[in-house]
Image (tube, grey):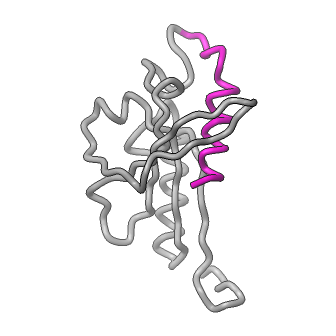
Amino acid sequence: MPRPARDGKAPTVVHLTAEYWPYARTGGLGEAVEGIARGQAQSSVRAFALMPLYRVVRDAGFPLEPVGSPQTVALGGATESIRLWRPADRADGAPAVIFVDHPPSFDRGGIYGEAGADYPDNPRRFALFCRAALEA
């Protein structure tokens, strides 16, 4: 059982992840993060997972709803527009999942790359994801 915070409230844990089952996975990372977050949520920890909104998530037809209004994120001297989404059908007691939507970065055929090669802009894509998570 986790220790409560000094104010007596349950702690909050936010997982920033490139993969989260059942939405997107390439190996075992998605299952591992989901299992950890689920275990935390079952132990009275407020568990959240933030991940990119990949094309594979959209194509799978998961019902999503927007969270707030579009936001801007500064990265490398540029300003990018992002939108946050969440599953519309979250089960009671399940970890909250928030998707970071930035189509130029994440509306692609693969998660990390295609045809056996990484996307050359992966460092920028995931830096944008981290900045968006900090703003969320």
Residue 68 position within the rendered picture, expressed as x and y whole percent measured from the top left: 42, 56
Residue 94 position within the rendered picture, expressed as x and y whole percent measured from the top left: 39, 65
Residue 121 within the segment the image draws in magenta? yes
Total residue callouts:
0
Relative side of 67 to 72, left or right: left
Residue 123 picture quarter: top right
Residue 91 position within the rendered picture, expressed as x and y whole percent measured from the top left: 30, 64
The relative height of residue 62 versus residue 54 in the rendered view (above or below) is below
Magenta span: helix, strand or loop, mainly?
Answer: helix
Relative side of 60 to 126, left or right: left
Residue at position x 50%, y 23% in the image: 104
Considering depth in this image, is 35 or 70 the residue closer to the camera? 70
Residue 75 position within the rendered picture, expressed as x and y whole percent measured from the top left: 70, 34
Relative side of 100 to 134, left or right: left
Considering depth in this image, is 35 or 108 the residue closer to the camera? 108
| Furthest-top residue in this view | 115
Magenta stretch in the rendered image: 116-136
Residue at position x 43%, y 25% in the image: 107
Considering depth in this image, is 74 or 136 the residue closer to the camera? 74
Q: Quadrant of the C terminus?
A: bottom right
Residue at position x 74%, y 30% in the image: 77
Residue at position x 46%, y 28% in the image: 103
| Furthest-bottom residue in this view | 8
Q: Quadrant of the N terminus?
A: bottom right
The relative height of residue 83 versus residue 111 in the rendered view (above or below) is below
| Furthest-right residue in this view | 76
Residue 73 within the segment the image draws in magenta? no
